Amino acid sequence: MTTKAHLIAAMKERLMPVAARTLSRSGQDILPLLEASIGVAMVRQGLKSDPAALPYVELEKLDHVADWLSASVARDMPWLRKVSEEGIPRKFAKFHKVADVLTEADAQLAQMSRTAMRDVDGGDGVKIDVRFDDGWHIAELTSKNALIDEGNAMQHCVGAGSYDSGVRDGTTRIFSFRDRKGRPHVTMEYSVEENKLVQIKGKQNAFPLGRYFDRLVPWIAQKGFTVYEHELSGGYFVTRDDPTRMRHVRELREGEKIEGGLIVRLGGDFAGPLHLPAGLTVSEEMRVETQEGSDPTTVLIGAGLRARWAVLKNVESHGIENMGTRDLQVYGGRIVPGSEPKSFLSASFINCDVGNLLETASFEELKVCGIRTVKIPGDGRFAGRVRLWEVNEVIVEDGGQGPEELVVEGNIQDRGQTTVVIESGVYMGKLAVSQAIVRIGENAIFSRWLSLDCAKLVEPPTRLSAAHLGLKQVSGMPVLPATWKIAGTLGISAGDTTSLGERNEYWNLNLSDSSIISLPENLVVGGNLDIQRSRITSLPDNTVIGGDLLARLSHLETLGDGTRIGGSIDIGRTAIASLPVGMQINGDLTLDDNQRLRIRGDVAVAGKLTVRSMDAAHCLDRIEANSYDLHSAKISDFGGRAHIKGDLDISADALAVLPDGLCVSGNLAVSGGFLPDQQMPENLEVAGDIKFEWDFDGELPSGWELPSGWRTGGTVVAGGTVLRAATLEAITDEAWTKTAGY
């Protein structure tokens, strides 16, 4: 599955429950609109910034977009009918980022709330559920008018129309917490099917102030309602073992064990610092985050805290060395490291201030984004895979053990040019750098791969060792240094490297789309040589290729004298004029539109001969192969050949030139349009199956039959219809040799 397909699948999985909740409360199936709007924006943003995952979008924001879409459908907004040829609203074309969709949803829902039409006979629709001693009360809203009034007072979208259907049919209940004068302060959406409060909103969709929500907690417990954990903020949370019991993070005790996840959002009017007690154990995810747009909350981490994985978002964390976790993810905010060194199995630091943590901690796996300078020590502390993007400078310090794999993606989102410096004597497994300026010191060793993509190489070192080397659109090295040691594959594509220098021995050599114009004398390639779409015009004399020669669409004109090729050859669409007399090809031979090719002596092909977009007559006269794929070739003459060793694949119009009595030792496949008066040879003998892949529907034309004397050792199939069973017994190799005269 491609990266894009993976992101699309993840997006659909993310949005389906959002659409299901919307369908339940509004009666509107908005899944296609949801996917085409915010779903497409999520995929676009994911492909641009981090191909491995969709951008994180809070559940309440997805619900907010769903409310806008369902209200638009309920009102039959005109923009829904202005669509592209694919049926997508043209409005969606301007959405390139998630923020674009959220801004549009905010504006449209605000407009809908202001222009909502009241029911003339709808009544007030306010039903008191419970009244407290001081006159404050919780009311259920049961009419369209009540929802409009609530939305206008609270400045959110409950009155825009997306909840009307659910309230009307009883699948959704809306509660409002009000003061003694009847002014609302909290709006809650309850799903009857789930027995759950799925939304809890203060004014403008913010989390309610603590003094209001504190009064709601006993009522929610008395009702037996559960709450979506992502809806809670202000330090409140629920746990898996008791989802009806809401707790505040300040109630956590030292040594407490929490089964499941602990998600704490510090929005509303929560005032820090937050103390996470010593010895706290969370069996799954622990997430602590400050509401977006607020200043980071100070979080003090107690000794011995344990979580399977931990996420800190927009917080200022102290005592991170006290945390034991398999995977630490930090987004925004700031880390204030302690004096004790820390070891992490896996850590991600995204757009945050890490202080001096990278200088003291060790990592098995590390991801860093948005930090200006990253220094990787040579003491082995960064042992596993390191991925860096949106950074300005990367330095791998000299004289020691670098990471097993370092991936640097530079020059993203206009953050300036990225510079990568590999100091002298560094030893690492794999280095992959894209869109950056690269400087590599002397005697660097890459035991697995060195891969540079869209990079500028500054002052290339004299000595370098790599198991495999890949250079794609690399500038700064016109000639490959002969002193570089490359044990495996060398790949060069585009860029300004025009010469391999004096080095003439390679394991695999891939020069497709490269600027290389000539190859070194006495070239030896142990595996494959790929020069497709290159400017190379000839192979030097005595070239040895242990594997395949792939030269399609190159400028190749000649194969040097004494050239030996151990595998297959593809010289399709080249200007090559001849093949060496008596050439032995141990694999397949592919010819495609090789109009200049003239074969002056016999050529033996151990595999398959494929001919396309040219007359195969000359090839059939000179080339002996083990099977023939000629269905895309013109065949003016069969070259007097009476025997075909192996399979034969031809087009329907080539049947007219097959000689009577032709023997085929394998299968015969005929493709193309059906011709009722098609001329066909007589007494054809095929050891295997005969298959006609003609283009016609339904039954075979009346009266159609095979010519007289056709015999087969298999079956005859035309258009998927088996015409008859075998009329020949199986032909053994010995019998075929005798029949064919070999």
Image: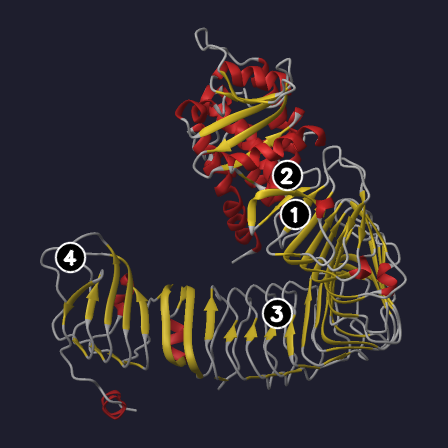
Mark nearer the N terminus (2 vs 1): 2
Q: Callout 3, which amino acid? A: Ile
x 52%, y 78%: residue: 579
Q: Callout 2, which amino acid? A: Leu
Q: Nearer the viewer, mark 2 or mark 4?
A: 2
What separation in Å lies between label 3 and label 4 (alpha carbons)? 47 Å
655 displayed left or right of 96: left
Mark nearer the N terminus (2 vs 3): 2
User: Image quadrant of residue 56?
Assistant: top right
* Tag of residue 263: 1
Is 506 in front, or is 134?
134
321 displayed left or right of 180: right
Label 2 with label 1: CB-CB less than 8 Å? yes
Mark nearer the N terminus (3 vs 4): 3
Residue projecting furthest to the top: 120
Is 668 in front, or is 45?
45
Question: What x and y, as percent, mark residue 291?
Answer: 72, 38
What separation in Å lies between label 2 and label 3 (alpha carbons)? 60 Å
Q: How is the image coloured?
A: secondary structure
Q: Callout 1, which amino acid? A: Ile
What separation in Å lies between label 4 and label 1 (alpha carbons)? 68 Å
* Tag of residue 700: 4
Q: Callout 4, which amino acid? A: Leu
CA neighbours of label 4 inside 10 A, class few (<14), some (14 to 19), many (20+): some
Q: Secondary structure at mark 4?
A: loop
Mark nearer the N terminus (4 vs 1): 1
Residue projecting furthest to the front: 133
Residue on which disc 2 sits:
232
Q: Nearer the viewer, mark 4 or mark 1?
A: 1
Residue on which disc 3 sits:
531
